Amino acid sequence: MRRIITATVQNSSGVLNRVTGLLSRRGFNIESITVGETEIEGISKITFVVDVEEAQKVEQLTKQLHKQIDVLKVNDITDTNKVARELCLIKVVATPQSRSEINGIVEPFRARILDISKDSLIVEVTGKPDKIEAIIDLLTPYGIKELSRTGITAFTRGKQQKQVSDYQTLIV
Amino acid sequence: MKTELAIKEAQLNSRIEDDFITGADVLIEALVNQDVDTVFGYPGGAVLPIYDALHKSDASFNHILCRHEQGLIHAAEGYARTTGKAGVVIATSGPGATNLITGITDAMMDSLPVVCFTGQVSSAVIGTDAFQEADVIGLTTPITKYNYQVSDIKDLPRIVREAFHIATTGRPGPVVVDIPKNIAQEVVTETFDTDFHLPGYQPTVNPNPLQIKRVMNALKTAKKPVILAGAGVQFAQGSEELKEFAEKHKVPVTTTLLGLGTFPGTHEQSLGMAGMHGSYAANMAIYESDFLINIGARFDDRLTGAIKHFAPEAKVAHIDIDPAEIGKNIETHIPVVGDAKEALKRMLNSPVECDDHSEWYQAVMENKADSSFWYERSDDLISPQWLIEQIYEETNGEAIVTTDVGQHQMWTAQFYKLDQPNRFVTSGGLGTMGFGLPAALGAQLGDRDATVVAIVGDGGFQMTMQEMQTLKHYNLSVKVVIVNNEALGMVRQWQEEFYEERYSESLLDQNPDFVKLAEAFGAEAFQVKSENKVRETLKSAFEHDGPALIDARIVKLDLVFPMVAPGKGNHEMIGVKPCGE
């Protein structure tokens, strides 16, 4: 079971090391991890994806994370209403003949071509992980020279659904 | 004239020294502010400025020079375990720091408040593999509650305050503060604000009243309740409340190894220690119970045995200040996060009266009477269990007892029935050989008037025996009893039981002459080989003002029973009664 966990941390030196070290010594395998600053100075947010079998293990993971002195907040947002995005750069083999074909794939994915050279081009795509998987699948036949994914970063949504229904009652 | 000049110069120098203080002075002042009375330390290159400041200062604490850094940290653990205060350690960079690693891990496993100050090479050369450089932060991150490397002298007073706060509150644990040499040397002209703010560290002390209510409601209807008490009760100083609560509701009480003494060992409701070498009555009470209240224990595997057979019928309530322990090993039905004492107070105030469970209580107590710890006397050498009983009687059961790890540790746990908390100092979670002697040293420094006995094995003693010299140096009256079976007894026992008696490297028939050795360290020393000499030898040792050692030759092939074999459930104990009964 793939879980998306977010941790708000104090941006002290070595905090990433503390968190990843904790996960590895407690036997959790990190599939992806992203870290970045937040709107508050000195506070960072770590989003990571782990593959955990049992619910008890997930609970143990969040508790152990929360026990860290530098960790302010931990959320397992897997089952919440959320926005999760990942960015991926793909360098794909492209001859002048295949360029337009590739363009035909890139457009519906709302991906962008960042760089074109004689025999390759670089595609930037952002979205949910399954969308990224899909474009990688479609580009593979052309020959992928290099690929780099950032891993997921995620937010829970605001109370949008409720707000929408509020608007509707207003309109009616 | 010359002398006058010299005096003038000296006055000038001291004026300069008065005006300028260094990072090392700031550290010592911060330790004084924490009411530290004892520091266990060992000098070295990177801590030279700290030792120089120590030499010049009139600091109110004692500095104890152990003979190895492992001695420092175990002594600090012994001090912390018996006093409840943080044990303080100073060691130098590189090997000084790495020699602390075993003890820091030990303190982490057994939740002991220890604050270690390690020297570090100067900031400018960190990361260059400088002389005596080791990545102390990297090494100690997994084995500390928290660690710091000081990068700015202004942070030092705050870090010291935070370190003591983190080490001693919530679930206690070790904290390391790594101080680069240039920080200790840096001259400062002002003092700094020492307020601290740890928004990510807010231990829950007061338990949720609703959860307490759930515990009490479950207790009300329980037909077969039992209490399991761990070290958490001692850290919270909740032994009185535990006793009152257990007596009020007439619930049998068992403890973990580290919980020995939290509930009086001679109390009629006490079942003694549970687990691998615990009492049969305790293990069966847990096995058959329908409501298990765990207060401040962490369901260690040596306690639970095979998890599927652990308290299979029981609803489990778990009171712990560390939420991560709840549900970690054993499925918990009623989690209570909070301080053990605070939880017990609230449970005592609950108006709930228990339904009658006297039938269960009777059955458990009959089982207790029927399955007490047993041993066979030898005609020839000393029976180890009998030896522990003699130490118990000689000290009126009131000594602070420390142990190493292995057979003698289990015999001590079984036969030295402690009635007081914070008197049993043993390495539980990590199982560190060589722990007993330095831990006794620390315990004695924590309470100079206490009788302190280090009950150690002949193997473990040889791992840290250099600390005999520290005992002599400070004339500490620790009594060391080597339970000598010329073997790594527990290893040998497992080889006998599970490896068809192939005693691979576990027989120590090449031991030193412990008496001569102890005498070389300046201690009184005795060897005792027969039971009829044991009491007088113990008396002589205890009467001696200063360190004394007894080399007690015990039955070599004796085994610790009863036992839960690895992988078995606690109800499948072997050796509950002597063969043929």
Image (cartoon, coloured by chain):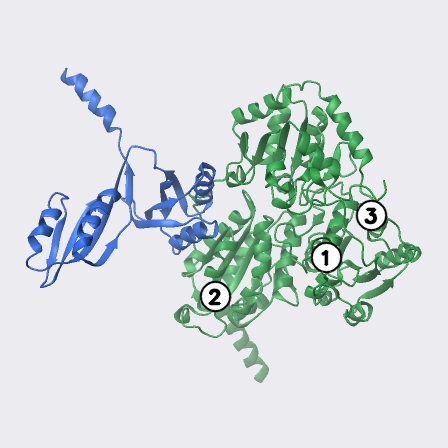
Chain colours: A blue, B green
The residue tagged 2 is B184
Q: Nearer the viewer, mark 1 or mark 3?
A: 1
Picture disc at residue B500: 1
Q: Answer whether labels 1 and 2 touch (C-beta < 8 Å).
A: no
Looking at the rendered structure, the kind of residue marked 3 is Tyr
Looking at the rendered structure, the kind of residue marked 1 is Glu
Quadrant of the image occupied by residue B317: top right
Query: How many numbered marks, from 0 up?
Result: 3
Q: Nearer the viewer, residue B280 or B333?
A: B280
| Position of residue B526 measured from the top left corner of the image (x, y, whole percent) | 85, 64
Query: Which numbered disc flags the more N-terminal residue, 1 or 3?
Result: 3
Secondary element under disc 1, as helix, strand or loop, is: loop
Q: Nearer the viewer, mark 2 or mark 3?
A: 3
Q: Nearer the viewer, residue A130 or B444?
A: A130
Q: Answer whether labels 1 and 3 touch (C-beta < 8 Å).
A: no
Crowding near pointer 1: few (<14 within 10 Å), some, many (20+)?
few
Quadrant of the image occupied by residue B481: bottom right
Say whether mark 2 and mark 1 are on the same chain: yes
| Position of residue B349 measured from the top left corner of the image (x, y, whole percent) | 62, 23
Between marks 1 and 3, how big is the CA–CA gap? Answer: 35 Å
Picture disc at residue B392: 3
The chain to which mark 2 is attached is: B
The N terminus of chain B is located in which quarter? bottom right
The C terminus of chain B is located in which quarter? top right
